[in-house]
Structure formats: C-alpha cells, structure tokens
Amino acid sequence: MKIGIADTTFSRVDMFPYAEATLKKLDKRIQIERYTVPGIKDLPVACKRLFDFYGCDIVMALGMAGKMPIDKQCTHESSTAIQQVQLMTNKHILEVFVHMDEASDDKNLDIITKNRTTKHAENAYALLLGKNSLSGYAGMGRRQGREDAGPAVVSGKGNKISKNKKSKIEKSKNAKRR
Amino acid sequence: MKIGIADTTFSRVDMFPYAEATLKKLDKRIQIERYTVPGIKDLPVACKRLFDFYGCDIVMALGMAGKMPIDKQCTHESSTAIQQVQLMTNKHILEVFVHMDEASDDKNLDIITKNRTTKHAENAYALLLGKNSLSGYAGMGRRQGREDAGPAVVSGKGNKISKNKKSKIEKSKNAKRR
Amino acid sequence: MKIGIADTTFSRVDMFPYAEATLKKLDKRIQIERYTVPGIKDLPVACKRLFDFYGCDIVMALGMAGKMPIDKQCTHESSTAIQQVQLMTNKHILEVFVHMDEASDDKNLDIITKNRTTKHAENAYALLLGKNSLSGYAGMGRRQGREDAGPAVVSGKGNKISKNKKSKIEKSKNAKRR
Amino acid sequence: MKIGIADTTFSRVDMFPYAEATLKKLDKRIQIERYTVPGIKDLPVACKRLFDFYGCDIVMALGMAGKMPIDKQCTHESSTAIQQVQLMTNKHILEVFVHMDEASDDKNLDIITKNRTTKHAENAYALLLGKNSLSGYAGMGRRQGREDAGPAVVSGKGNKISKNKKSKIEKSKNAKRR
Amino acid sequence: MKIGIADTTFSRVDMFPYAEATLKKLDKRIQIERYTVPGIKDLPVACKRLFDFYGCDIVMALGMAGKMPIDKQCTHESSTAIQQVQLMTNKHILEVFVHMDEASDDKNLDIITKNRTTKHAENAYALLLGKNSLSGYAGMGRRQGREDAGPAVVSGKGNKISKNKKSKIEKSKNAKRR
C-alpha cells in the first residue's frame, strides 16, 4: 500500500507530518511518497506523477489558499484539475484544502489544518480498504476541520437506523473524532 | 441490470436506503452496488469506478452540499467531473444533490432528500429501459425534491396535447408523485 | 440525414414537436431520433449517445432552466459538457436552452420557446448542408427566441455589403423570421 | 498556408471581410477556409472541423457577445472549449471576441471590431511564421480593439531595452497600429 | 535540461529577461526555448507545443492580466487550460501571472513582476531537480511577487520543527528572498 502526499511551500502550516503520523499509526505497512510543489495550482500534476511514476494507490493533496477572491479562483482551478487526474487514473485523491479565512488566528489555522489533515488521512486509508468501509458512516454528517454535524434525523420513516448505527452516531457526536 | 449508488459520509441524511427501497420496489431483478466516500467531490471517481470495475449500467450520485459559497463551488466541481464521467463511459449518472439551504429545518431536509432520491431512482430505472421511456412526460415540468411545476400551456398551437397526455398531466398534478 | 433531438421532463414546454414540425417541413427525408431525459444536466450524455449509438449527424439539445442562481450553474455545467461532446464527436449540437426568467408569463414562455426551437431547427438543417450555407447571414445580428438585432452598420468602409446582401437584411428585419 | 476563419450570424458586424482583407494584404499565398455558425458557442467545433477536415494551419474564431450576464457565461463556455481544441490539435486559435458593452454605439462597435479583427489577423500570420516572430514585441503592452498600452517601464534595471527596441516602442505608440 | 518560456506581447513588462537571467545564474547548462504569443489565452497551446515540438522538460508561462472582470475570466480560462496541458504531458508548468491591479503604479508593476518571475524561475529549477527539493520549505508560507508570509506556528505539537528548519525560517523571513 503506497500513499502519495503532495504538499506546498505556500502553505503556512507544514501539513505533511500530520498526515504521515496518522497513516503510520493506522498501518505500519503503509509506504509514503512525498512531493512538494510551490502552490495549490502545482498540485494536480504532482498528484498525477505520484500515480504514474511512483506507483501510488491513493494520493492526498495538501494545500492552503489565501483570503482574496483570486485565491478562490486558484483553488477552483486546482480542484477541477484534481478531479480530472482522478478520472484519468481511476484513483482517489483526498483534497485537503484549508482556506486562510476559515481561521480566527494563526494558532486556530494550525488546529483546523491538523484536524482536517488527520481525518482525511483516515479517509484515505478507509478508501484503500474498499468501497464499503465508510458505508456505516454514510449520512452521518461527518466533517473534516471541525466537529461533525451529525445526522439530520436519527430515525426517519423509510430510513430505520439500527441500534448498532445509533451507537455509532452517539460515539461520533460525543467523541470529537481525532 | 446493475445500478451503482455512490453516497457520502458528509451528508446529514442517509440517502442510500431511499434509493434502494425504490429500486427494489420497481424491479426485483435490479442488482445494486454501493460505494461510500467522504464528500461530494469524491463522488465522480467513485461513479467512474462503479462503471469500470463493478460493471454498473447506470449510477446514482447521492450528495449533500453545505450553505456557504465555497460549498456551491464544490458542487460545481463535482458536477463538472460527473459530466465528464458520463461522456467517458457513455452512461448516465443521475446526480441527486441536496443543498442544505433548500430546507427550513432538519425534518424538512429529510423530506426533500427522500423525495428527490426516490424520484431520481425512478428516473434511473426509466433511462435503463430506453431512450423514450420518459418521452411521454417531456415538457411537463417535472421536479425532484418538490412538487411538479407542470406544463406552461396545456394546449399550444403547434403542440397539440392528446387526451392521453392530458390525463397524464392531471395525474401528475394531483397525485403528488412519490 | 439523421437528426437527434434530446429533450427533458423538467421543461415546462414540450419543445420536441416544434423542432420536429420545422425539420419535416424543411426536408421530408430527415430522420429524427428522440431521447428524453429528466433535466438539463442529463442532456450531454444523451447527445453523445445519439451520435455514438444512433448514428445522428447533428443533434439539438432542448432544455429549460429555472430562475435561481443554482439553475444558471446547472446550465453552465450542461453547456460545458455539450461543448465537450461536440469536440469528441466532431459534430454540431444546437443548444436550445430557455431560461424561465426570460418570459413574462407562461404564454410568453411558450412563444419564446417555440421561436428559439424553430429557428435553431433551421440552423441545424443549414449546418448539415455545409459550412457556408449560413455565410450569407454572417454579421447580420440574427437572434433566436426574439427578433433579430440586425447588423450594426449596413455599409461599412472595409465591409461593402452587396445589393443582394442588403435585400437579405431588409427581408430579415421586416419579415420577423418564424 | 491555410487559415481557417469561423464566424457567426449572431454578430452585428460582418467580421470576415476585415480578416480576409488583412491576410490577403500580408501574403498573397494564404488560402482561407470560412465556416459560418449561428453563435459564439457553435465556434469551437467549427474550429476543430477546420483543422480536422479542411487542413487549416491556424484558425481565427470571430464572435460577438451580448451585454447580459448570461452572454458572459456563453463566451466563457466557448473560450473554454476553444482552449481544448487548441490542445487537442496542437494548433493556435486566435479568439477575436467583441463584447457589445465595449462600444458606445453601433458605429463604435464596428470600429472596435475592425481594429481587433485586423490586428489579430496580423497575429495569426506572425504565429504561422514561427514561435519567435512576435518576441520583439514581448512586454510592450500591445492591445487589440484599442490603442496599445505600451510598456510599463522603458528601461528597467534587469531589463535593458536596446535602441532598436526603443524605436519599435515609439513606432508602436505613435503609429496607432492599423 | 531544457526549459521553455512562453510570454506575451500584451504584458506591459518584458518578463522573459528576468526568467532567463535567473536560470542562467542557477545553472549554466540550462537551455531555454522562448515562445511569444499575443495574450494570456494563447499561452496554453504554446506551452504544449514547447513540450511536444521543442522537447522542454518544464515550462514557465509568463502572462499579465488587465484590471477588468473580463480579464479575470481570461486568466481563469488560460489557467484551466494550463492545468490540462500539465496533465496531458505529465510535466510542470510554472504559471507566472501578474494582475495589473496588484500594482500601485507602473514602477511597482515592474517590481512585482520581476520578483514573481525570478522566484518562480528558482521554483522551476527546483522542480526539475526532483520531487523533494522543495520539501524543506513545505508549510513555510512562501510567496512570489511579495515577501514570504512565513509559517503560522513555528513549533506545533505534532509538527516539531528541527533546529535546521528553524534557521531556514529565520533566513526566509529576514533575507527577503531575491
């Protein structure tokens, strides 16, 4: 199992160690390939190269975006190309983008970034295990970078939630996933 | 007949059971392949994989979007890639996206989501049956997630509506399709 | 000569009969393949399938869009994909999209829709005849869905308009093309 | 040397003669293939067909856009696809788009259109001659459709402008390029 | 090592000499191929041609954008296509775009342009050397066209910054990279 991690020098937080630590904790056998580029728009081809030249099975794209409208445009262009890479390679890329205007200050920026990177590292690992490893959490309002929103209705009509699932929801709501 | 269903852990409603129940009611022979991903931007490659690796004939992409401008951007990126998957595979993907700001509260969110998912499951089945199975309803202002708008003019000049069609319109207007 | 026509159940006007009537009047030999989908975002792959599986030489994509900002986004996504289909197949698709906010009321919506559909059916036929069959009308401010705008200057310096052309302009301006 | 010119019936100025006259003046040997379509969104596939079926070496896409927000969206969709055609064919397309809100009145619309079309015809010819035929004008603030902006600094530190170049700038500024 | 540089006649600053000087200083063996086009939207296919016909290993796309909303749209279209070229060729393109509204006056425009072009020339060279040559600077808030922002937190919890790294940060903050 080889996971690619692409990151940037533009980012104000070093996101790679957060991803690496989580992945290593999840499974000792995971190999990691790192690829560092200047900014968010250099990530898509780095991801593609991690698949094509370094044999990665899944990639995490770690990026940070500024506060200006032009920065939103840049993330849009990067995201669009990251979608294309996925379709060209038939492989998942976990896009871990943090917008600087999400944070109240520098410390908060680090907290959001760590939370999002960590949770998406877990998602990357889950997707590698198979297409149904996240199915138990479908519809449960999971969030990365902040607390989970949780499900809108715990027990709908056509949508009976089993006891097993309910306990998962409680766990999800109370436990503040790492 | 194999129908793929891709869903997300971000969604606050478990959409899969609504789709599954509808499809099973329509035709016992339908096989379903489920694929769960973190969020709306992970759906396109999941759809592609459902076609390429799991032999699906049609796919439903079930997703939910937040209320912020950045969330609209995310659905746009996802939708653009879902279009590409359809062109690459020559197969239909029914995009069932619910925007959280469509709903007045959590219960309403569940109602909208159920309505849209159910109706699009019917559409998916109709498209599988052939390119003209929906032709009888063309121009009739059908909606998913809310009541049908109905046709603008029941009997236009160049557009004579047969008695048969008129009765369909009445049925459509009165019956509040599932 | 086979012309594909893709239409939707979302539309509040049955656009297909307007296109069909015009094409049949223009040339008895035209064969028509119809493909009905739920909404505007299902049109691109339907168009592609009309080319790839039904041997169409040109396609008309008939769609209607709602009044909300999200509807503009949907038409944008559909249009972008319709562009891609054209480039993948090297064939023209006449996009006949009507926005509900163009019309003052339901009757007006039908009038605009009929006008646009009819004129674009004529355009589809002209494009099938050859790349220069519309050249006589180049720069003449033609519009679909409303009256022609006409040319900005009837006789420019470097742009001498022949008598033959002038009479076409008059005809175009006075005759209120169907 | 074969140059394709795609134009529209939507345009309120007949742009083709302006391009043709300029190209014929530049080089008698240039062959021109014309392709007329209804509107700006029909141009991309016309350009592609000019390359694929008519053997053009370069193409000019002549279009005009209305004043409404939806018109900006249309030019965006057309431009995006014109980019794709260039990448699919490895050939240049000179996009000559005029926005109706650029002009104060109809006469001014014709003047802007002529200026932009003429200058881009010159650019098309230059690009055909080689990748460095415009290098002497790099950074000189050239504009099409209006007067050149000129360079920001005539003599920067790291950017010494030779006498030869300076005279070109003067010529460029004074001569009001055709 | 061959580096392609695409530039424009639209730009008000001659950006090529800034890139060339930096690259030549970094490594005498670097060969440069220049390609000049009219404007920002002509850059993507020029970049593709620099890869396909001139054997470049990496390309810098030097462009300048006007102050109007339509100019933002043009850069968006160009950037989207530049992303595609990278994915088609599996090679990096350093996008060096300057927006005229970034600068207070013409002299400032030249300063920003020089700074951004120079730093991205260094980035291009680093990327050529390997996927980890920039890893030591990941998360350090590097900027091109202005001073570096620096890292948000020098010593996070899960993100221990080594002494070696700290000194790099100081250097980065104090030294005002060229």
Image: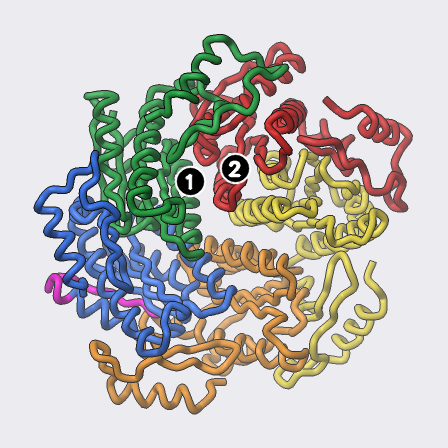
Chain colours: A red, B yellow, C orange, D blue, E green
Disc nearest the viewer among 1 and 2: 2
Other residues around mark 1 within 10 Å, as few (<14) / some (14–19) / many (≥20): many
| Towards the viewer: D7 or C125 | D7
In the image: residue B58, left or right of residue A3: right
Indicate the quadrant containing the C terminus of chain E: top left, top right, bottom left or bottom right: top left
- Residue in the picture at 55% in, 20% down: A16
Magenta residue check for D32: yes
Q: Secondary structure at mark 1?
A: helix
Q: Which mark is residue E83?
A: 1
Q: Chain of mark 1?
A: E
Residue A123 appearing in the image: no
The three-letter amino acid code for the residue at tag 2 is: Gly
In the image: residue A90, left or right of residue E110: right
Q: Secondary structure at mark 2?
A: loop
Magenta part of the protein: which range?
D24-36
Q: Chain of mark 2?
A: A
| Towards the viewer: D85 or B137 | D85
Residue D102 appearing in the image: yes
Indicate the quadrant containing the N terminus of chain E: top left, top right, bottom left or bottom right: top left
Residue designated by label 2: A66
Residue A48 position in % (x across, y down): 46, 30
Q: CA distance from mark 1 to mark 2?
A: 20 Å
The three-letter amino acid code for the residue at tag 1 is: Gln
